[in-house]
Structure formats: structure tokens, C-alpha cells
Image (cartoon, rainbow, N blue to C red):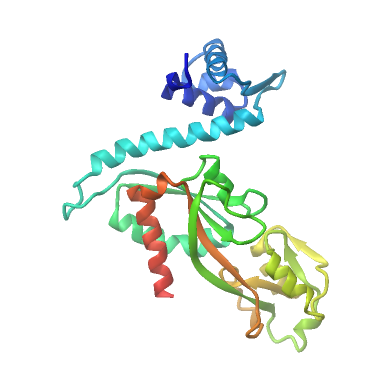
């Protein structure tokens, strides 16, 4: 047998075992049995010539080769879905143009999910009622949103660009906007720069940290929060000041005040990433078009 003999059902089995963490649970999810799933996985491993899962008393976990295989399996299955949806949608739009129906999976960091995506998705679904978007909020740490796309769990990632979370090889993307950082502090405080610094792990980039290091007035963070929303809550309660990007400050509490950091202030680029094959699909192109339209409206 050759690897060309891999069938969509085998790919679904790989994805199910990785998702469910074991053969029995995967069998239940697929309406099959533990023995059938185990037999299928052994057959796939023989075809590929590599062990894909570590078996143990606690289930099955993908090996490094298995992680790669499962990521490809997810992406191939997604393109099979796109093949059906796009073929049916050719010329089916109200003006004779192409349309599409089906899921659109988006991974986004918190402030992008809260403030950037909603107006874009509103416009997208008005133009393409058949598209059903889902948004997973992913921390922009380590692989981040781009990692979700690379792993086949998302079609599009809204990501911070040019930071400690680079776009993985094999993906495509572009910058959508550049947002400035500003100082946020309790409203009316006479000397906000004297306050303790409140920070969170995702609020980082090499450029921003370099800028911070050059500012003698910025202390080491003594208060750490889970996310930017918690940071704003702490600042609003008078526990300190923070340096935050514009998206995070979109709906800052009235008890806070935002101060510009001047012409040399740091900025953060926000963009999208997707796979080369999904970049050509109607749904992904339509989402990117709406996101770019928001940038023009700003």
C-alpha cells in the first residue's frame, strides 16, 4: 500500500483519536468500536511507516509525527468541506456571483475577539448568510492563534505580527492595522507615572519591551493579571497604571484615564494568518475583505 491509499475516513479517525485522547472514546464519537479504531490506526501507521500515537494506560497521545499527521488530516478534511461548499455555491449568489455556506473557524486573541471581529462578522454574515462563523479566544503565547491555524483547528487566526509569536512556516498572512500603546491610569491621579505597574503575559513584544527598558520611569511590574480585562479592572480600582495597546483600551472604564505616550510610543501590528489553500476560498477571502474594510473606516 502507498500513502495515496489514505481515505477521508482514516483521516477522521486520526483526528478523533487525537481529540478524544483514546481509541475507545474516539470509537464512541465516531459510532464505531475501540477495536475498529485501533485496527484502523495500526493500518495507517503501516502505510506511513511511523508510529503516530503513544499508547498507555491513560489513553493515546500523538507522537511528534502524529501531531504533524493530525494537523495535515484536519487541513485536508477542511479542504474537502470547502470543495463541496464552494462547488455548490458557484454562481448561486443573488447577483450571479459565488456564494458559500458552512462553518468559518476563527481563532483570535481576546481584544481582537471583543472589538475587532464583531463588526466584521456582522457585515460578513449580512453579505453571506450561509456562513456560520465560530470564534475561539486563544492566548497569544507560544504558538498562539497562528498555531491553531497551522494545527488545522482554525481557518483564520487574528494574530499579533512580528512579535514573539511569529507566523509559522507554511502559512500566509498580512497586517490589518497598527495600534499604538498608551498609558492608562486611575482618572484624576496627580502623578500616574509614580504608580505600580500592572501587566499581563500577553502584553509583550520585543519592540515594546525594548522601548520599556529605555524608559527610566517605568518600574518592573509588581502586579500580574490574567488578561487585559483584569488589568483594566485593577487600574480602575486604583491598584496601579498600565501600558496597553489601543484595542485593549476600546471600552476602558470611565474611572480610568488614557494618556498618549508621545511620538516615540510603541505600536503593535495586528493581522490575519491562514493556510495557502484556505486563502483562496470564498469564506476566508470575504472575511479578510471585511476586516480590511474596517481598517478603512477607522
Q: Is residue 53 toward the left or the right of residue 3 in the image?
A: right
Residue 66's spot in the image, x, y percent?
60, 28
Question: Closer to the camera, 255 or 116?
Answer: 116
Residue 213's spot in the image, x, y percent?
79, 73
Q: From the viewer's perspective, is residue 2 above or below residue 114?
A: above
Q: Is residue 127 toward the left or the right of residue 155 in the image?
A: left
Residue 22's spot in the image, x, y percent?
61, 22
Residue at the image position 74 percent from the left and 85 percent from the top: 189
Residue 67: which quarter of the image?
Answer: top right
Residue 52's spot in the image, x, y percent?
61, 23
Q: Residue furthest bottom?
A: 190
Res 41 visible: yes
Residue at the image position 65 percent from the left and 79 percent from the top: 265
Q: From the viewer's perspective, is residue 140 above or below residue 35?
A: below
Res 237 visible: no
Q: From the viewer's perspective, is residue 185 above or below residue 84?
A: below
Residue at the image position 36 percent from the left and 54 percent from the top: 285
Question: Closer to the camera, 246 or 160?
Answer: 160
User: Which part of the image, by quadrant, shows the C terminus?
Assistant: bottom left
**Number of marks present in the image shown:** 0
Residue at the image position 30 percent from the left and 47 percent from the top: 130
Amino acid at each position: 500500500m502507498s500513502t495515496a491509499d489514505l481515505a477521508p475516513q482514516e483521516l477522521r479517525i486520526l483526528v478523533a483519536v487525537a481529540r478524544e485522547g483514546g481509541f475507545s472514546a474516539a470509537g464512541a464519537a465516531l459510532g464505531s468500536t475501540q477495536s475498529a479504531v485501533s485496527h484502523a490506526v495500526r493500518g495507517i501507521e503501516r502505510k506511513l511507516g511511523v508510529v503516530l500515537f503513544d499508547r498507555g494506560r491513560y489513553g493515546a497521545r500523538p507522537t511528534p509525527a502524529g501531531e504533524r499527521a493530525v494537523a495535515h488530516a484536519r487541513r485536508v478534511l477542511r479542504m474537502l468541506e470547502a470543495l463541496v461548499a464552494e462547488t455548490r455555491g458557484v454562481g448561486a449568489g443573488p447577483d450571479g456571483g459565488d456564494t458559500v455556506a458552512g462553518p468559518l473557524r476563527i481563532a483570535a486573541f481576546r481584544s481582537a475577539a471583543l472589538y475587532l471581529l464583531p463588526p466584521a462578522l456582522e457585515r460578513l454574515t449580512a453579505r453571506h448568510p450561509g456562513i456560520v462563523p465560530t470564534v475561539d479566544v486563544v492566548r497569544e503565547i507560544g504558538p498562539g492563534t497562528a498555531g491553531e491555524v497551522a494545527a488545522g483547528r482554525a481557518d483564520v487566526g487574528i494574530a499579533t505580527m512580528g512579535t514573539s509569536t511569529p507566523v509559522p512556516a507554511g502559512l500566509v498572512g498580512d497586517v490589518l492595522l497598527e495600534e499604538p500603546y498608551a498609558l492608562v491610569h486611575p482618572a484624576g491621579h496627580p502623578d500616574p507615572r509614580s504608580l505600580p505597574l500592572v501587566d499581563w503575559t500577553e502584553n509583550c513584544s520585543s519592540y515594546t519591551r525594548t522601548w520599556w527598558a529605555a524608559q527610566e520611569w517605568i518600574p518592573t511590574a509588581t502586579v500580574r493579571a490574567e488578561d487585559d480585562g483584569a488589568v483594566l479592572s485593577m487600574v480602575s480600582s486604583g491598584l496601579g497604571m498600565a501600558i496597553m495597546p489601543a484595542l485593549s483600551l476600546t471600552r476602558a472604564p470611565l474611572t480610568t484615564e488614557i494618556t498618549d505616550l508621545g511620538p516615540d510610543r510603541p505600536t503593535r501590528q495586528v493581522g490575519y494568518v491562514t493556510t495557502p489553500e484556505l486563502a483562496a476560498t470564498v469564506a476566508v477571502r470575504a472575511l479578510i475583505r471585511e476586516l480590511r474594510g474596517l481598517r478603512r473606516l477607522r
